[in-house]
Amino acid sequence: MWVVVSRNVGSGAQFQLSSNSAANENFENYVGCDMPKSDVDLVEFPLNLEYLEAEFFLWGSLGYGLDKFAPELADSGPPPLGAQIAKLSPLIRDVITQFGFQEVGHLRFFSIS
């Protein structure tokens, strides 16, 4: 199984791969390989989804998003238009807040990878 451990997006995206199987002899052929833009787009989609989920849950439960909660992850991007706190019971608000914190954790993981 191959796992992406870092990415550098620039003129040509580069991914470093790590294998959890030491028996793979061809690992050196894949480290630092260039990926076509279409593949980079496929990898970027889940990251964009993480941002969407984080904003959705944070705004719905706390009334603010990444720009206030984790500005280093917002990357100077604009806040969502029309986002507001939802009318939730205390139990549901707590659950949705935890979902938001979990999504922020995912984004922090991706930002150090």
Image: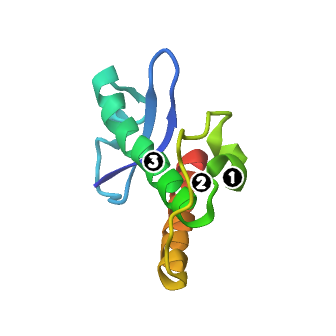
Q: In this rendering, which labeled residue sits more in front, label 3 or label 2?
A: 3
Amino acid under label 1? Ala
Q: How is the image coloured?
A: rainbow
Q: Which mark is residue 52?
A: 3
Label count reads 3
The residue singled out by tag 1 in the image is 70
Residue 113 rendering spot, x and y as whole percentages? 55, 47
Q: Residues within 10 Å of mark 3 (few under 14, many from 20)?
A: few
Residue 106 rendering spot, x and y as whole percentages? 51, 58
Q: Are marks 2 and 1 in contact (CB under 8 Å)?
A: yes
In the image, is 90 to the left or to the right of 29?
right
Q: Earlier in the sequence, mark 3 or mark 1?
A: 3
CA–CA distance in space, label 2 to label 1: 9 Å
Residue 36 in sight in this render: no
Q: Residue furthest front?
A: 87
Q: Earlier in the sequence, mark 3 or mark 2?
A: 3
Report helix, strand or loop for mark 2.
Answer: helix
CA–CA distance in space, label 3 to label 1: 14 Å
Q: Residue furthest top?
A: 11
Residue 4 rendering spot, x and y as whole percentages? 41, 46
Name which residue lies at 49% across and 74% down: 88
Q: In this rendering, which labeled residue sits more in front, label 2 or label 1?
A: 1
Q: Are marks 3 and 1 in contact (CB under 8 Å)?
A: no
Out of 24 and 58, give the one closest to the viewer: 58
In the image, is 89 to the left or to the right of 108?
left
Q: Which mark is residue 108?
A: 2
CA–CA distance in space, label 3 to label 2: 14 Å
Residue 51 in sight in this render: yes
Q: Compared to 72, does 58 lie above or below?
A: below
Report helix, strand or loop for mark 3.
Answer: helix
